[in-house]
Amino acid sequence: AQKVTQAQTEISVVEKEDVTLDCVYETRDTTYYLFWYKQPPSGELVFLIRRNSFDEQNEISGRYSWNFQKSTSSFNFTITASQVVDSAVYFCALEGYGSSNTGKLIFGQGTTLQVKP
Amino acid sequence: GAGVSQTPSNKVTEKGKYVELRCDPISGHTALYWYRQSLGQGPEFLIYFQGTGAADDSGLPNDRFFAVRPEGSVSTLKIQRTERGDSAVYLCASSYYATGGNEQFFGPGTRLTVL
């Protein structure tokens, strides 16, 4: 079975602080994809990043960076110099490939990030 | 371009009634997905279509739930004999293909409340 765990339910930081959102996953698929989505107060899920299981290279996009470690089955997300606009619920998700898990995203429970001015 | 649209945005119904929720995917997207999100939870997979056929309906909770996509574009999620536990936000998403790893673009959702 596939599973995604986001142990942090809520995080509160002050603007300009760095914050890391944790994601741990479980899968028996040898090929899989990991995603992060942002759900702002408006409610619509916004895609942030996708990684495949063969690419463990970390990625940086502006203030966002992602650390993928297969050895610990983790795909953590760091926001540097957080801003109030980063306040949202963040979801980590997993999709298998080449199995019955293809085509469906398995989401974690989400981490609510509050950035205070 | 236009994103995924869902109608209605809100639906209030009484226990035992029948409801239909509609999803218009992004033009050209062959795959369409339905998820359900309860308060404080992540979205939960229900069903997905590749073209007109349901490729995987393993997430539908019971036979009161049914979805169609007759022409490979618009999809309707149908819920019979609604129960209070069906109250949630129903999300629709679409992608170019459903072969794995494709970005799914989500709509704003339909908030269903069963009284």
Image (cartoon, coloured by chain):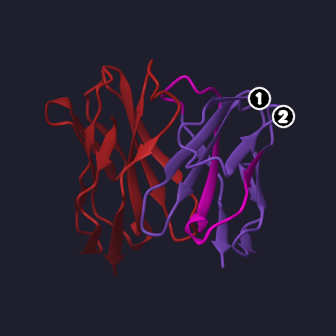
Q: Residue A3 appears in which quarter of the rendering?
A: top left
> Is residue B31 within the magenta segment?
no
Question: In the rendered view, does B21 fall on the left or right side of A25?
Answer: right
Question: In the rendered view, does B69 fall on the left or right side of A40?
Answer: right
The answer as to whether the residues below labels 1 and 2 share one chain is: yes
Q: Quadrant of the N terminus of chain B?
A: top right
Q: Residue furthest right?
A: B71
> Is residue B100 within the magenta segment?
yes
Of pointers 1 and 2, the one earlier in the residue sequence: 1
Question: In the rendered view, does B4 fall on the left or right side of B48?
Answer: right
Name chain A's colour.
Answer: red
Q: Residues within 10 Å of mark 1 (few under 14, many from 20)?
A: some
Depicted B94 relative to depicted A31: above or below? below
Circle number at residue A114 = none
Task: Determine the chain carrying the residue at label 1.
Answer: B
Q: What residue type is disc 1 on? A: Thr
Name chain B's colour.
Answer: purple
Task: Determine the chain carrying the residue at label 2.
Answer: B
| Nearest to the observer: residue B41 or residue B105 | B41
Q: Residues within 10 Å of mark 2 (few under 14, many from 20)?
A: few
Q: Position of residue B51 (x, y in %)?
A: 74, 27
Q: Position of residue B74 (x, y in %)?
A: 81, 42
Residue drawn at (37%, 59%) of the image: A110
Q: Which residue is mark 1?
A: B52
Give the magenta range: B76-102
Q: Which residue is mark 2?
A: B70
Circle 1 SS class: loop
